[in-house]
Image: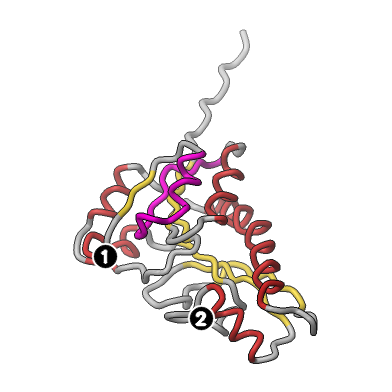
């Protein structure tokens, strides 16, 4: 008589926060749709007009929209995440500072991607084209992305990994934006998987 097969462990559960178009969120949903380790259980946004809601709908992923009061003056968002047994919170183009109650509920379980080589070009107001223009104005020789844990300050959490590219003399804003997005789409889902595999 053959031994019974071990019960498969349940998939880990990811929640994605995004404020805008959600191209990174889409790449993450695509990646984990065919992954045995984890699934995207919820997409949350502070922007009711964000295109990420349509992308989530395309993947039949549940969504939740919240406002500033719910995020900063209540436990509404934390309770939703806890009810869904979320293992990892992933910020993908989310522009608000994460409040203390969320940090405490998910210690070392919130990660972010930043379109620059931190610690340079981080902090409040540094996102998207604001960063790329600053990088070009400073005549930097390279740029890239930083994937890091989230703490109580913008872009200051412990670094997980960085990926970089050389800035060519002819590169304009559009080139930088494109190269950054290519790095994000290529690496963020894989790094998320690596982080999930290390979670206790």
The reply to whether callout 2 and callout 1 are in contact (CB within 8 Å) is: no
* Above or below, 192 relative to 166: above
Front: mark 2 or 1: 1
Which residue is found at the position 42% from the left and 49% from the top? 43
Q: Nearer the viewer, residue 104 or 118?
A: 118
Q: Nearer the viewer, residue 185 or 150?
A: 185
Q: Is residue 165 visible?
A: yes
- Kind of element beneath mark 1: helix
Which residue is found at the position 59% from the left and 16% from the top? 3
| Disc 2 packing (10 Å; few <14; some 14–19; many ≥20) | some
Checking the image for residue 68, the label placed there is 1
Question: Is residue 159 rendered to the left or right of residue 90?
Answer: right
- Magenta-tinted stretch: 37-58
Residue 56 in magenta stretch: yes
Q: Position of residue 58 (x, y in %)?
A: 51, 39
Q: Nearer the viewer, residue 199 or 153?
A: 153
Cα distance between the residues tagged 2 and 1: 22 Å
- Kind of element beneath mark 2: loop
* Above or below, 10 relative to 72: above
Q: Quadrant of residue 163?
A: bottom right
Q: Is residue 87 visible?
A: no
Residue 147 in magenta stretch: no
Q: Position of residue 194 (x, y in %)?
A: 60, 54
Q: Position of residue 144 (x, y in %)?
A: 66, 73
Which residue is found at the position 74% from the left and 74% from the top? 165
Disc 2: which residue: 122
Residue at far right of view: 169
């Amino acid at each position: 008589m053959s031994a019974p097969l071990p019960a498969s462990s349940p998939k880990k559960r990811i929640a994605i926060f995004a404020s805008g178009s959600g191209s990174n969120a889409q790449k993450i949903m695509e990646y984990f749709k065919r992954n045995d380790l984890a699934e995207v259980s919820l997409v949350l946004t502070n922007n009711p007009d964000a295109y990420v809601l349509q992308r989530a709908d395309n993947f039949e992923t549940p969504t939740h929209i919240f406002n500033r009061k719910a995020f900063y003056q209540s436990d509404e968002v934390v309770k939703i995440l806890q009810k869904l047994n979320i293992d990892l919170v992933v910020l993908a183009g989310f522009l608000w500072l994460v409040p203390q109650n969320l940090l405490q509920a998910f210690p070392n379980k919130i990660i972010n991607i930043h379109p620059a080589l931190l610690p340079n070009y981080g902090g409040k107001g540094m996102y998207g084209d604001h960063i790329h223009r600053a990088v070009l104005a400073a005549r930097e020789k390279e740029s890239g992305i930083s994937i890091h844990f989230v703490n109580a300050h913008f872009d200051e959490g412990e670094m997980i990994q960085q990926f970089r590219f050389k800035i060519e003399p002819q590169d304009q804003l559009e080139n930088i934006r494109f190269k950054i997005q290519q790095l994000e789409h290529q690496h963020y889902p894989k790094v998320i998987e690596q982080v999930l595999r290390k979670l206790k």
